[in-house]
Amino acid sequence: SLMEDVATQTGGLSSTAGAGASRLGRWVAKEDDDAVYLKVPMPGLTKEHVEVRADKNILMIKGEDEKQPWDGDDDSKVPRYNRRIEMPAADAYKMDKIKAEMKNGVLWVTLLKVKEEERKDVFHVKVE
């Protein structure tokens, strides 16, 4: 499944809202030695309507467009997006350095990794 692929690619990155999908589209994660990159399609939304927050090891992505008068009472026409993505360990990422950029209805999020030598939860024991 996509969720298993994402969990494998990102060392356990998972979504509490399902297998990397929403009614607005699938999100995709890629990883290299320096960061995890998320591509989150959010058609119909602009940066003014998107909020990204990090709380401990949870990345929260929320977006909601404004209801237009021609929508009437039909709330289903208003683009909405609500995602909680759980990282395996908050201290493995530079949570205060998360970068989010909205381009053409796609949110691009970069989570920089903490290098192993910078991590406070990894201890190197000298063997004597």
Image (tube, rainbow, N blue to C red):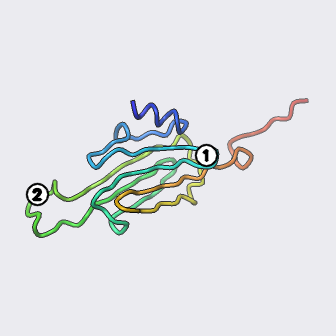
Q: Which residue has dot 2 on it? A: 74
Task: For mark 1, give the secondary structure.
Answer: helix
Q: Nearer the viewer, mark 1 or mark 2?
A: 2
Q: Is residue 99 left or right of residue 121?
A: left
Give the residue type at disc 2: Asp
Q: Which residue is pictured at 48% across the width and 35% down the height? A: 7
Q: Is residue 11 left or right of residue 15?
A: right
Q: Position of residue 43 (x, y in %)?
A: 30, 57
Q: Which residue is pictured at 18% across the width and 66% down the height? A: 67
Q: Position of residue 56 (x, y in %)?
A: 51, 50
Quadrant location, the C terminus: top right
- Which label number is shown at residue 36? none
Q: Which residue has dot 1 on it? A: 92
Q: Is residue 75 above or below residue 46?
A: above
Q: Position of residue 22 (x, y in %)?
A: 30, 45
Q: Quadrant of residue 70?
A: bottom left
Q: How dense is the environment of label 2, judged by Cα within 10 Å: few (below 14), some, or many (20 and up)?
A: few
Residues at marks 1 and 2, CA–CA distance in whole angstroms: 43 Å
Q: Position of residue 122 (x, y in %)?
A: 71, 40
- The residue sitting at the left extreme is 72
